[in-house]
Image: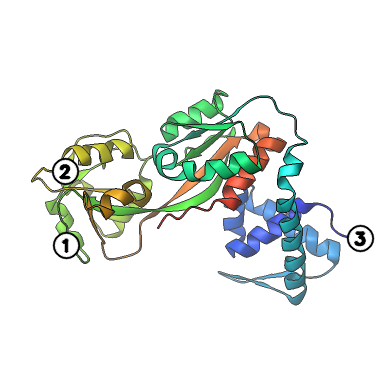
Amino acid sequence: MMLRDFTKLQTFIVVVQEKSFSKASAKLGISQPAVTQQIKFIEEYYNTKIIIRKKNEIRLTQEGEILLLIAQEILKNLHKYQHQIMQIIHYDEPIRIACSHTIGHSIFPKCLPTLQQKIYSDTHFYISTSLQAIRDLQNNLCNLALVESYIPNEEIIYREWLEDEMVLISNLSLPPRLIRYEQLYSYTWLGLEMTKQVIPEIYKYLKAFNLNREQLNVKMRFDSLNEIKQFMLENKESKIPYIAFLPYTQVKSELQSRIFFSTKVPGVKLKRKLYLTYLKKYANHPLICAIAEHIIFNTKVSLN
């Protein structure tokens, strides 16, 4: 008898795709023990080992490889009939999705048409800050929120969605190659006085180079990354070299038209996670779950 609970097979697929139990947990919005338990259930059901876990990797057994092909074929057929399946759900209210600035301006508009076509036509979005989007979610002013910050809340499920690269930009031409981190003290910084909920990755990045934030020349206080971009645009002719980390998706066109300039700092790339969120009480809501699954696993947007 075939395993009928596709949720567990989907967990298996995501574990393989992410090559990690913890990353699969973040993507699925469930705990890591829950992921482990589902894989264990499959192995006990078939009385065979399907995944071998090592320190920093996983490996499929021969039986795991066979099961993966079967699970992928089931998933393919579910996608094939997804639109017809969604017609069965009777829901008379519009679905509202709150998006943070970068997501709402640069990412989600590219996802919405397919979402409306395949899942639910009466889906709409509006742009807000990450913090306000989470508040709207709590107050039932939206059904889902796509945000740039993890703001802990016991009522909300956070699922990792995309990974966005933050790039170092300036209103004036920067060195064409890698800039030395000591030179960062000579620029006027924008955005480092924002709340830690907004840019924790930047603080960690600067700390990795032993840069003292207290010694950096920081200009003004901003409430959002979008405000930093607007300030840079308004001062693009200034002779003062302003510098800031902003999402590549948010400044891609300005970089291509050389309104802004970018360079790299030695070391790893600065990336941040983007999240899809909804209230825990809707964890089994058929329409909200279908929309969430579609956004997370069928997003075709290049962030590079």
Name the residue at 26% across, 60% down. 209
Name the residue at 68% across, 36% down. 287
* Label whose residue precedes the other's in the sequence (3 or 1): 3
Color theme of the render: rainbow
Whether residue 219 is visible to the viewer of this picture, yes or no, is yes
Residue 167 at x, y percent in the picture: 31, 54
> What residue sits right under mark 1 in the picture?
175
- The residue furthest bottom is 62
Tag 1, which secondary structure?
loop
Residue 163 - label: none
> What residue sits right under mark 2 in the picture?
236
Tag 3, which secondary structure?
loop
What kind of residue is marked 1? Answer: Pro
> What residue sits right under mark 3 in the picture?
1
Does residue 52 lie above or below 122 as drawn?
below
Does residue 37 lie above or below 146 as drawn?
below
Residue 280 at x, y percent in the picture: 64, 35
| Image quadrant in which you'd find residue 229 | top left
